[in-house]
Image (cartoon, rainbow, N blue to C red):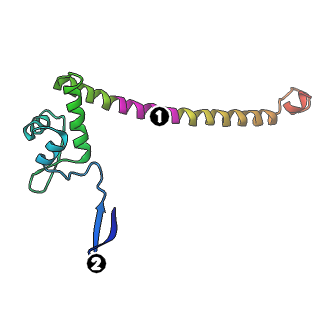
């Protein structure tokens, strides 16, 4: 999304354009991403080889890091520097977060299904009550009487 801002500077108009980029779109080259994350570019390459980060690639193969990638790099930095985790621990945290996210989506889907089933059971019970009122018991040699007339 582009946003234009017009202003006056020294008697002439100057324009400023602001562009918002999706957080998962690769926009930073490795040197910029490393600087934003406070790391050396070689560290980013190592994290990529371990599978901790997966930058996009340009058509010519240049690594392109997104805002989300930079945030993930900062999280890795926080877990290793502040929490004392090694890279194996960081990998495990990310695995567990992925698993937690999957399970949360599964629970939400099951809750929606349970709600749908509860509504269906309620509808079927109502239908059963309506049909029960219409059932006519057969009495051998006797008259046919509606069940609802018997309860009066």
| Majority secondary structure in the magenta region | helix
Q: Residue at x 67, y 37 (%)?
A: 123
Of the residues under marks 2 and 1, which one precedes in the sequence?
Answer: 2
State the SS at label 2.
loop
**Side of 20 relative to 152 (left or right):** left
Which of the two residues, 107 or 76, is positioned nearer the viewer here? 76
Which residue is outermost to the bottom? Answer: 11
Which of the two residues, 86 or 83, is positioned nearer the viewer here? 83
Where is residue 5? Give x, y as percent.
Answer: 34, 67
**Side of 10 relative to 130 (left or right):** left
State the SS at label 1.
helix
Q: Which mark is residue 35?
A: none
Q: Residue at x 29, y 60 (%)?
A: 19
Which of the two residues, 66 or 122, is positioned nearer the viewer here? 66
> Could you tell me if the residues under marks 2 and 1 are in contact, i.e. CB atoms within 8 Å?
no
Which one is in front in this view, the residue at disc 2 or the one at disc 1? 2
**Side of 72 relative to 127 (left or right):** left
Where is residue 98? Give x, y as percent.
Answer: 31, 32
Quadrant of the rendered image containing residue 103:
top left
Where is residue 51? Give x, y as percent.
Answer: 16, 35
**Side of 81 relative to 149 (left or right):** left
Where is residue 1? Give x, y as percent.
Answer: 34, 61
Label 1 crowd bin: few (<14), some (14–19), many (20+), radius 10 Å:
few
Q: Residue at x 7, y 38 (%)?
A: 42
Residue 76 lies, with reference to residue 56, above or below; the image says above
Check residue 104 for magenta coloring: yes
Q: Which residues are magenta?
A: 100-112
Q: Which mark is residue 11?
A: 2
Q: Residue at x 14, y 48 (%)?
A: 32
Residue identified by numbered label 1: 108
**In what quadrant of the picture does the C terminus appear?**
top right
């Amino acid at each position: 999304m582009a946003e234009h801002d017009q202003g006056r500077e020294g008697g002439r108009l100057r324009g400023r354009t602001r562009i918002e980029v999706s957080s998962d779109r690769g926009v930073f080259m490795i040197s910029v991403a490393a600087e934003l994350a406070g790391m050396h570019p070689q560290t980013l390459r190592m994290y990529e080889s371990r599978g901790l980060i997966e930058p996009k690639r340009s058509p010519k193969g240049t690594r392109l890091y997104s805002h989300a990638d930079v945030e993930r790099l900062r999280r890795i930095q926080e877990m290793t520097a502040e929490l004392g985790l090694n890279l194996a621990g960081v990998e495990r945290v990310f695995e567990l977060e992925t698993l937690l996210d999957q399970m949360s989506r599964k629970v939400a889907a099951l809750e929606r299904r349970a709600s749908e089933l509860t509504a269906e059971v309620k509808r079927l019970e109502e239908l059963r009550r309506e049909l029960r009122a219409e059932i006519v018991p057969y009495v051998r040699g006797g008259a046919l009487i509606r069940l609802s007339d018997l309860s009066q």
